[in-house]
Image (spheres, grey):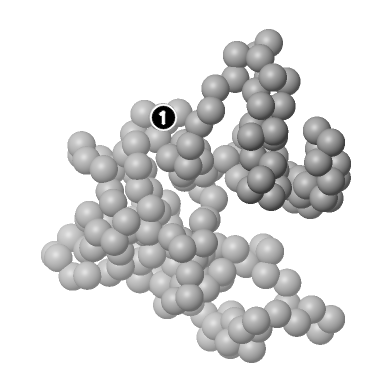
Amino acid sequence: YYIFKHLIFVGIPNVLLSTTGYTGSGGCEIYFRNEDAFKVWDAVFEAGKEFNIKPIGLGARDTLRLEMGFCLYGHEINDTTSPLEGGLGWITKFTDTKNFINKENLLKQKAEGLTRKVVGFEMIERGIPREGYPVTDSVGNNIGHVCSGTQGPSVQKAIGTAIVSKEFTKTGSEIFI
């Protein structure tokens, strides 16, 4: 889990295989040059023929990653939402031997405490929460915004993530979209 390896894939050198399982399915991702796309596509579908595999797009990745609670850069985390706010403190390693971009500001944020955080939610009423929709408290005060939202195919509910003020990050908090 979470490895990256260069390998020869269907005769193509320097293909990158990763096992981040980003849909929560335990799958893998394959990275290759554009000019090798048809060869890789054909080989994958030939290998999966007996299993009747079908192509599926980024919409499926989004619904499945949301059901698993996985962040996606550009949605739950970005230039204004830190990995700590996104709930990724478990992979943000603050050791003396590891240096990374924005480490000092993240250390400060960790020491001072978060003022907002990304949370998962489910809709009670019918509707699809869309990215950017405002999130309010019960009296209409703005407390954040939706990061991602969709209809979860496995859970059969409208679900999503939102970045909200610290007071609304406890399980069971009521928010309005």
Foreground pick, 144 / 113: 144
Percent x, y for residue 119? 43, 57
| Left-right relation of 60 to 36 | left
Location of the C terminus by quadrant is bottom left
Foreground pick, 115 / 30: 30
Residue 42 seen: yes
Q: Dot 1, crowdedness within 10 Å: few (<14), some or many (≥20)?
A: few
| Left-right relation of 93 to 160 | right
User: SS at mark 1?
Assistant: loop
Residue at the disc numbered 1: 153
Find residue 163 and report its image quarter. bottom left
Q: Which residue is drawn at 52% across and 56% down?
A: 71
Find residue 11 and report its image quarter. top right
Q: Which residue is drawn at 44% across and 76% down?
A: 80
Q: Residue at x 22, y 40 (%)?
A: 127
Residue 18 vs 132, above or below: the answer is: above
Q: Look at label 1 and name its amino acid.
A: Pro
Find residue 84 and report its image quarter. bottom right
Q: Which residue is drawn at 26% across and 43% down?
A: 128
Foreground pick, 160 / 168: 160
